[in-house]
């Protein structure tokens, strides 16, 4: 098992996992654009030579914005999401960032579980933020400070 920074050559793998995870999955070109940005922070997990999870965040002033974490469907609930966030948090620490911020759909129980595990708390709501089938669903805005966190995150 390896956790390492994602590179341009990984764009297709990231797109594969993203497309398997979201209705509006990002293309290889989308990822290539993100991976070329200096303010981008991207890490991935490899198991038996296969990319199984990744995370992507963005440096924005002193904030680290978490854009997405996704684990290949067959690999979920095996701790990959946790490890990906920890690696992103280390990178955010190295860059001297202060605060994590993210948006997550109100009905995304799995992602909220992961974020709460890592000490995120809800700080706001964006009403009807995401498309959900024919309707809309709110985004919860969540935050925590950058760096090892007390509580469940175990630091
Ligand atoms: C959210 C997601 C990234 C979690 O990844 P994962 O590799 O399965 O996460 P982990 O195995 O590290 O789980 C860590 C913790 O998150 C929570 N969690 C993960 N999946 C959960 C689920 N289906 N229901 C409730 N809690 C869940 C639990 O607290 C879990 O700890 P536990 O297994 O000891 O109970 C994964 O479900 C996914 O790829 N979903 C689709 C993409 C997505 O919605 N991404 C987030 C929005 S940007």
Image (spheres, grey):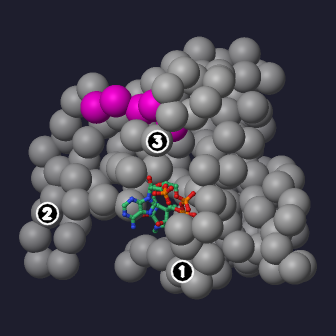
List x then y, in percent, for residue 145: 52, 19
- Distance (Cα) linking label 1 and label 3: 20 Å
Q: Disc 2 on helix, strand or loop?
A: strand
Other-residue count near label 1 (Cα within 10 Å), few / some / many at <14 / 14–19 / ≥20 = few
Q: Which mark is residue 136?
A: 2
Q: Which residues are magenta?
A: 118-122
Q: Main secondary structure of the magenta part?
A: loop
Residue sitting at x 70%, y 28%: 92
Q: Which mark is residue 117?
A: 3
- Distance (Cα) linking label 3 and label 2: 26 Å
Q: Disc 3 on helix, strand or loop?
A: helix
List x then y, in percent, for residue 137: 16, 59
Q: Are marks 1 and 3 in contact (CB under 8 Å)?
A: no
List x then y, in percent, for residue 138: 17, 51
Query: Is residue 120 part of the magenta span, yes or no?
Result: yes
Q: Which residue is mark 1?
A: 73
Residue sitting at x 36%, y 50%: 112
Residue sitting at x 11%, y 78%: 134
- Distance (Cα) linking label 2 and label 1: 24 Å
Seen in the picture, residue 97 relative to 66 is either above or below; the reply is above
- Is 142 in front, or is 26? 142
Left or right of residue 104: residue 72: right
Mark 1: C-beta under 8 Å from nearest atom of ligand 1: yes
Mark 3: C-beta under 8 Å from nearest atom of ligand 1: yes
Q: Quadrant of the N terminus?
A: bottom right
Left or right of residue 137: residue 42: right
Left or right of residue 76: residue 124: left
Nearest to viewer (mark 3 / mark 2): 3
């Amino acid at each position: 098992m390896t956790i390492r920074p994602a590179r341009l050559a990984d764009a297709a793998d990231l797109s594969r996992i993203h497309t398997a995870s979201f209705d509006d999955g990002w293309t290889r070109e989308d990822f290539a654009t993100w991976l070329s940005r200096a303010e981008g922070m991207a890490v991935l997990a490899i198991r038996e030579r296969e990319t199984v999870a990744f995370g992507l965040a963005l440096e924005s002033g002193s904030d680290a914005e978490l854009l997405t974490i996704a684990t290949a469907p067959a690999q979920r609930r095996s701790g990959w999401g946790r490890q990906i966030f920890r690696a992103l948090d280390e990178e955010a620490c190295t860059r001297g960032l202060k605060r994590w911020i993210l948006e997550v759909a109100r009905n995304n129980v799995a992602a909220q579980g992961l974020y709460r595990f890592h000490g995120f708390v809800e700080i706001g709501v964006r009403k009807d933020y995401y498309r959900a089938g024919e309707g809309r669903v709110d985004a919860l805005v969540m935050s925590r400070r950058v760096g090892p966190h007390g509580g469940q995150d175990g630091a």
